[in-house]
Amino acid sequence: MVASSLKDIESAAIEVPAAKVGALRVAAIYGANASGKSNVLRALQFVCSAVENSQVRWKPQQRIPRHSFKMRPARSEEPTSFRVDFVVGGTRYEYKFAVGSESVVEESLHSYPEARARLIFRRSGDTFSFGKFTTGPNQLIASLTRPNSLFLSAAAQNNHEMLLPVYQWFADALRFVSGPRDEGNGDTFAICADASRKPLLERLLAAADFGLAGVDFKEREVPEESKCFFSAAATALPDTAENIQPPERIIDVTFLHQCENGESVRFSPLDESSGTLAYFGLLGPVIETLEQGGVLCVDELERSLHPLLALEIVRIFNDKQRNPNGAQLIFNTHDTNLLDADVLRRDQVWFTEKDRCGATHLYPLTDFKPRREENLERGYLQGRYGAVPFLRRDDFDVAVLAHADYVADGK
């Protein structure tokens, strides 16, 4: 999300002195169905999960839960590599690792306190080396790091003071929203329970014109029969038992609507529209990210949302006044209404396209050098930038007409 020299929507860029570049507040990914848009976010989510969980939750001798590229079976055992550049506490870092199915092949972390890279640690298989400025019990932690665990994960679990801020960035600064949002999420529920922040949530719900007067929130104990169910499931599936845990509390949310006589009527989530619930579920991560900074990654931003709501969320992140902490939003979408020079800068738009082997390629709109006044939505739908499905309309017609004849013949 490095900003180019474009001057479109100047508030959409964040100055990052540590990296000596500007960063973008928003990045949008477009592409045909099954082109790999979601996998771009899943790859980043895997990185965060590996940093946070590999030392604690991945078991010894367990295969690393990566997804190799199935379209090239002969190369399925080749390592999968990741690289992330980020800024923590005013310092730029570069973190890389490669994993096979059984073990971590390589891992490294460099900082850039000045123009040149400074080694913090490097790992090749079970061999570790450390930079001269790297303090802490490095060799001890290296000896405790399993072959299928990242050193950064092991360092955090052993309270490595120098590496904790980097670990915390992966564990806390990135949030992911994917899948159905009709049940809300932990961030939204936490805001409902916070008396100082709940009014903001209710104002944002009211601003969306859902006809809501407020939200009510209650917690209750988990019933014993539910606890027994989780216990039985954990016993039946011992390999995944750590992931089968009952919630500590059950959260009941009701939505308040005002009648014409001024009284409030309670609606359960089952009574609300999918759009209301999707927006409600998204608001928690949006508010948390805007308050604390960090990166919010949303799979299909427009899911069950009116285009104007998705547009407003993008505008909030792009606005320096409403987003003073430099929070960033990465999302994929099919909503071409956002391809507008007043909504997204040209360097904020990315595309995914599959090659003949089924591999995804991610590339920026700026590769095509579009003019500032160019109609990006029309150009995209016309296939000017690629990343659209190639529809064989004749085949559609043949299939439908053949089926119609089949039905007409009574077969």
Image: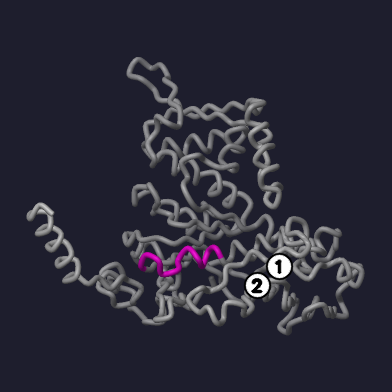
Which mark sits nearer the N-terminus, 2 or 1? 2
Q: Residue at x 82, y 64 (%)?
A: 155
Q: Which residue is mark 2?
A: 17
In the rendered image, which quarter contains the C terminus?
Answer: bottom left
Query: How far, Cα to Cα, is label 2 from label 1?
Result: 8 Å
Q: In the figure, residue 104 lies in which quadrant?
A: bottom right
Q: Is residue 195 visible?
A: no
Find residue 168 and report its image quarter.
Answer: bottom right
Q: Residue at x 33, y 76 (%)?
A: 386
Q: Which mark is residue 177?
A: none
Q: Is residue 40 magenta?
A: yes
Judging by the rendered image, the residue that carries numbered circle 1 is 90
Q: Secondary structure at mark 2?
A: loop
Q: Residue at x 71, y 59 (%)?
A: 52
**Secondary element at image label 1:** loop
Left of 398 or right of it: where is 256?
A: right
Magenta stretch bounds? 32-42
Characterize the local packing of mark 1: few (<14), some (14-19) or many (20 or more) Cα atoms within 10 angstroms: few
Query: Looking at this view, is 199 or 96 the one in front?
Result: 96
Q: Where is 373 relative to 369, above or below?
A: above
Compared to 391, does 116 lie above or below?
below
- Left or right position of 388 against 103: left
Q: Amino acid at mark 1?
A: Gly
Magenta span contains residue 204: no
Above or below: residue 4 compared with residue 67: below
